[in-house]
Amino acid sequence: MKFAKTIVMTAITSSALIMSGCANTGYTSGLSNTTKGAAAGAAAGALIKSGGDSKDIARGALGGAAIGGAGAYILNNSR
């Protein structure tokens, strides 16, 4: 049951991040690196915290999204 919650929370968070990335930059042919990093971070954070309750999973996903998005943004702008 907890694994199912993890999958659902990951899907919801990733979808929200992808949609917000497209809404902020206008329509582009692909996703920005920041959006990809945030989605990957959200998935990783949710999986790391999958042993806890749904609040822990959500916190892990949010933290992972913040770290992943920030890291991808910094790498993208430092090139």
Image (cartoon, rainbow, N blue to C red):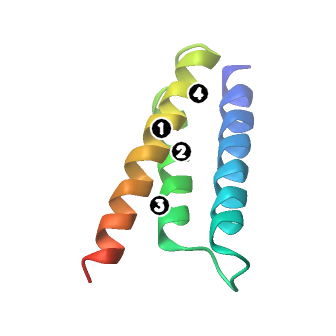
Q: Residues within 10 Å of mark 1 (few under 14, many from 20)?
A: many
Q: Is residue 46 above or below residue 71?
A: above
Compared across the picture, whether 7 is left or right of 33 comes to right
Check the picture and name the quadrant holding the C terminus: bottom left
Residue at the top extreme, as displayed: 53
The answer to whether marks 2 and 1 mark residues whose Cβ atoms lie closer than 8 Å is yes
Q: Is residue 38 left or right of residue 77?
A: right
The residue lying furthest to the left in this view is 78
SS class of the residue under badge 3?
Answer: helix
Q: CA distance from mark 2 to mark 3?
A: 8 Å
| Mark 3 surroundings within 10 Å by alpha-carbon count, few (fewer than 14), some (14 through 19), many (20 or more) | many
Amino acid, disc 2: Ala
- Is residue 78 visible in the rendered image? The answer is yes
Number of callouts in the render?
A: 4
Q: Which residue is mark 3?
A: 37
Which residue is label 1 attached to? 45
How far apart are labels 2 and 4 at the CA level?
A: 9 Å
Q: Residues within 10 Å of mark 2 (few under 14, many from 20)?
A: many
Q: Which residue does the image show at 55% across and 63% down from the upper left?
A: 35
Tag 4: amino acid: Ala
Q: Nearer the viewer, mark 1 or mark 4?
A: 4
Q: Which residue is mark 4?
A: 58
Residue in the image at 50% along x and 54% along y: 38
> What separation in Å lies between label 3 and label 1 (alpha carbons)?
12 Å
The residue lying at 60 percent from left, 13 percent from top is 53
Q: Position of residue 6 (x, y in %)?
A: 65, 31
On residue 42, the disc is 2
Q: Amino acid at mark 1?
A: Gly
Q: Nearer the viewer, residue 57 or 50?
A: 57
> Which of the 4 image quadrants contains residue 70?
bottom left
Q: Secondary structure at mark 1?
A: helix
Counting from the top left corner in percent of width and height, residue 25 is at 63, 72
